[in-house]
Amino acid sequence: HGLASVNIIFEGSNMEQAGEFGCAHMLEHLVCKRLAHLEADFANEGIEFNARTCPETTHYYIRGLDKSVKKYAKEFIRLITEEGLKFTPQELEIEKEIIQQEWQDADMEAERNLFNRFFEQYYQTPRTLGNLQEIKNISFQKIKAMAERSYRKPIMCVIEQGSKWKVDNQI
């Protein structure tokens, strides 16, 4: 058996507007929560699942043995593209706390802190983690509006496995 991956890519933190800095990363966390019920299945099948937000993209992926990834590909795509933005105000509030802790942890690590400061200078925008005050104050309505604007349609979905099955298209 070969290896396979499913990659779903949306806009990154560069699309954030004033009052939204850090929301792309927070959305990444909220969308990933939709896959929590599959974590044990993924682990049992040897599937790696992860996501990351950078200035250009927010990237969700699964990868592993082709038969395992193929088994979960449609459900993964559905959860990210259809269910991902169905979070509640309560989930948002919990995630704000998690992101704030992540923000504070990043400032405690000298290397990450240096990188974050460089990032802010180079891109002339707050780091991907965002602005702590904006994260604390973002309303449910504002992050939902930003999500609808940014997650309307993925930039790309790529499914690959050796020579047996391959799809490279827009959803």
Image: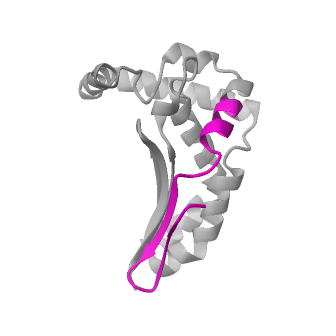
Where residue 147 appears, as percent x and y from the top left, is: 64, 37
Q: Considering the image in quadrants, where does the C terminus appear?
A: bottom right
Q: Which residue of the protein is positioned furthest toward the top in this rendering? A: 133
Where residue 76 appears, as percent x and y from the top left, is: 60, 62
Classify residue 140 by image quadrant.
top right
For image coordinates 75% across by 36% down, the residue present is 88
Q: Pick whichever, 68 or 163, lies toward us.
A: 163
83 on left or right of 25: right
Where residue 159 appears, as percent x and y from the top left, is: 49, 70
Q: Is residue 164 magenta?
A: yes
Where residue 167 appears, as percent x and y from the top left, is: 50, 73
Picture colour scheme: one colour
Classify residue 105 by image quadrant.
top left
Residue range highlighted in magenta:
143-171
Q: Is residue 93 magenta?
A: no
22 on left or right of 31: left
Q: Considering the image in quadrants, where does the N terminus appear?
A: bottom left
Q: Up-down: is 27 above or below 3? A: above
Q: Pick whichever, 62 or 105, lies toward us.
A: 62
For image coordinates 45% across by 32% down, the residue present is 14
